[in-house]
Image: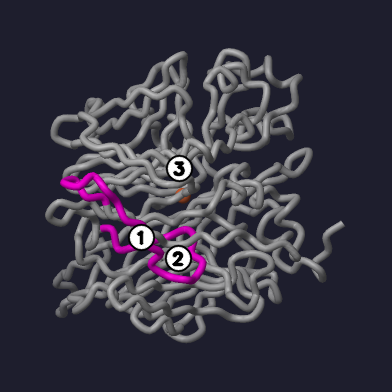
Amino acid sequence: MISQENNPYFEAGFSANNQETDVPSLEISGTIPEWIHGLLIRNGPGLVRSEKLVNHWFDGLSMLHRFEIRDGQVGYRSRFLDCNAYRAVKETGRIAYAEFATDPCKSLFQKVHTLFQGGPAITDSAKVNIANWNGRAFALGEPLMQAEFDKNTLERVGVFDYGQKEKTGVTTAHPHIDGARLYNLVQQFGARSFYQILSSDGGAVRKEASVGVGEPAYLHSFGMSRNYYIIAAGPLVVQPITLLVGARPFIENFQWKPERGTPFYLIDRATGKLAFQFKTPPFFSFHHVNAFEREDELVMDLVIYDDASIIQHYYLQRLANPEIELPFGRLCRFVFNFRTEKYTQEYLSEQCIELPHFDYAYGFARPDYRYVYGVSLRPDRRRGFYNQLIKIDLEARQDKVWHEEGCYPGEPVFVPAPDRTSEDDGVLLSVVLSADEQASFLLALDAKTMQETGRARLPQKVLFGFHGIFFRKKKRYEWLVGEWIQVAR
Ligand SMILES: [Fe+2]
């Protein structure tokens, strides 16, 4: 039995359901810069316990967390994402849809419409990420059902399914957005499986590319540069028939086959054709970071692991043990040369990093992008869960960190300062769990120095989540009662 004394973060971070909450104004210490004006919306598990605890960090049902930041003040609202999987738990008290590593009990299989022939229906709880697509907000998951929601009320208002009527596939929660158009990788499973790149500007869905594959890999993200889509298909692969039969939870159908190495598919964005294929030694990766071209080369930065054991480490049974060390994710740069068809591989930092983040609006596909932020593990406190924030300077090859005893931070999100003078001129926002206080706070760090500017305390804990995004609100000025007043739009 795990108690709070021997595992201070487990109950608060992983195993207790969150509550829907409205707090108009959080208690602030220090300073939340007054120029920050907008919404930080984060996604992650909020309901992890029904008749029993789910199996894995990736299995809880989505809760959206909305921090409204204005004039140095912070308001907070949280809501469960309304979806069939959530309604089923509310009505039956049990998980009724297949999650990443948790299936419903067998007797519920027949009660819900099946998507893959033999198994239970796949969750529609889009719990992983948030997208800002032409000003519209979407909760993103890996099933082919992304949920549009109202940024203010957090109510679901629609679904985007990539035009896929046959839902024998999955997508990623990490689309790329270039201008008005959203691009994502969709995997179709069947006798012949496919990695497909689909895109949409909000209207019809366009198939940009399709690569056939016998045993598809588990893919959590993909890369995109100005001219290429990049798929790094690590050797955690599946025989699609096992997914179609549906005897085991989704991820437990995949097998680690290191002898296959890691094929990189570089697909020409203009033609949709496979332009280059490279093979590197085996590694596992959740997160591509950024990709760019320079002369005859394509450069691709990813967070990689030696193998896929990180997935095993995220099972809650293992996370409950504070003595276990998580494998280190490492930021790695691959440089592919189109002329020589050779590649190089280099680690960009010695430190652990996961949930990597960079200023996408500024640095997407730019050769001079310089900073990557993320969660990390302190080298002298490797046991337990992510306990520091890190900033990796790709040019100077230096790291800066923030940590505080007993604190477990989530993914940092960068918010640029108005009229900024450098890429890191701005603030990082992170939801941090204080194990001592058994409550969370929104931390604001000066992104240049990684020093705290202030924090906004929540009256409760927030389960460890995944990804979020900042929706910047523009300020406008109106002539009111004899003076110019700044009005939020
Ligand atoms: Fe992710």
Return the mark for residue 470: 1
Q: Which sits in the foreground, 406 or 309?
A: 309
27 shown above or below 175: below
Q: Which residues are magenta?
A: 336-360
Earlier residue among tags 2 and 3 = 3
Question: x and y percent of residue 48 in the render?
Answer: 68, 46
Residue picked out by circle 2: 374
Residue at (75, 57) in percent of width and height: 320
Locate residue 468, reporting x and y percent. Answer: 43, 56
Q: Report whether 69 appears left or right of 62.
A: left
Viewer-nearest residue: 123 or 261: 261
Give the mark nearer the N terminus: 3 vs 1. 3
How far across and down, in percent of the image, does residue 220 sit? Answer: 45, 42
Asked which secondary structure carries label 2, the reply is: strand
Rounded to the nearest angstrom, the CA distance separating label 2 from label 1 is 16 Å
Q: Residues within 10 Å of mark 2 (few under 14, many from 20)?
A: many
Residue at 64 percent across and 51 percent down: it is: 314
Q: Secondary structure at mark 3?
A: loop
Q: Is mark 3 within 8 Å of ligand 1?
A: yes
Amino acid on which the number 3 mark rests in the picture: His
Residue 9 found in image quarter: bottom right
Does the rendering let one see residue 285?
yes
Residue 139 in view here: no
Q: CA distance from mark 3 to mark 1?
A: 21 Å
Q: Nearer the viewer, mark 3 or mark 1?
A: 3
Residue under circle 3? 220
- Whether label 1 lies within 8 Å of ligand 1 gets the answer no
Q: Tag 1: Cα neighbours inside 10 Å, few (<14), some, or many (≥20)?
A: many
Instruction: Name the kind of residue labelled 1 in the image.
Output: Phe
Q: Amino acid at mark 2?
A: Gly
